[in-house]
Image (spheres, rainbow, N blue to C red):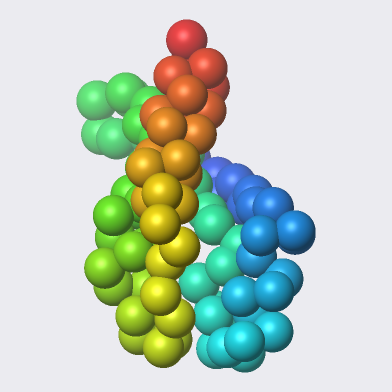
Amino acid sequence: MRPRTVVIFGNPKGGTPLMTKSATLAIDLPMKALVWQDDQDKVWLTYNSSGHGATVIYPRHGLAVPDGATEALEKFLAAASDQSTQ
């Protein structure tokens, strides 16, 4: 198996109240990113988009995403991804 590393990250101030509302959300939070190497030895960083969270993850746990949260999270993920892959 090629190298793979799962990075777990989140914000307890944001995630804990949501997990209190819906215990099953803990299966999807905290967020995760996967660092992996393909067959050509190229390294990738993969994670679920904030849109996926807003349209799939949160609704399946009966939660709504606060206004502006999807855009703010997408900006954070893009910045973290850019900094991590420089």
Establish if 65 lies above or below 43.
Answer: below
* Observer able to see residue 47: no
Residue displayed at 37% across by 42% down: 71
The spot of residue 75 in percent (x, y) is 42, 32
Establish if 67 lies above or below 24.
Answer: above
How many marks on residues?
Answer: 0
Question: Residue farthest to the front?
Answer: 67
* Observer able to see residue 65: yes
Residue displayed at 32% across by 23% down: 42
Seen in the image, is 7 located left or right of residue 43?
right
Establish if 43 lies above or below 14.
Answer: above
State the image quarter where residue 72 is shown. top left
Residue displayed at 24% across by 25% down: 40
Residue displayed at 72% across by 71% down: 16
Seen in the image, is 8 located left or right of residue 57?
right
State the image quarter where residue 56 is shown. bottom left
The spot of residue 36 in percent (x, y) is 41, 39
State the image quarter where residue 39 is shown. top left
The spot of residue 13 in percent (x, y) is 75, 58
Seen in the image, is 21 located left or right of residue 61?
right
Which is more toward the observer, 56 or 4? 56
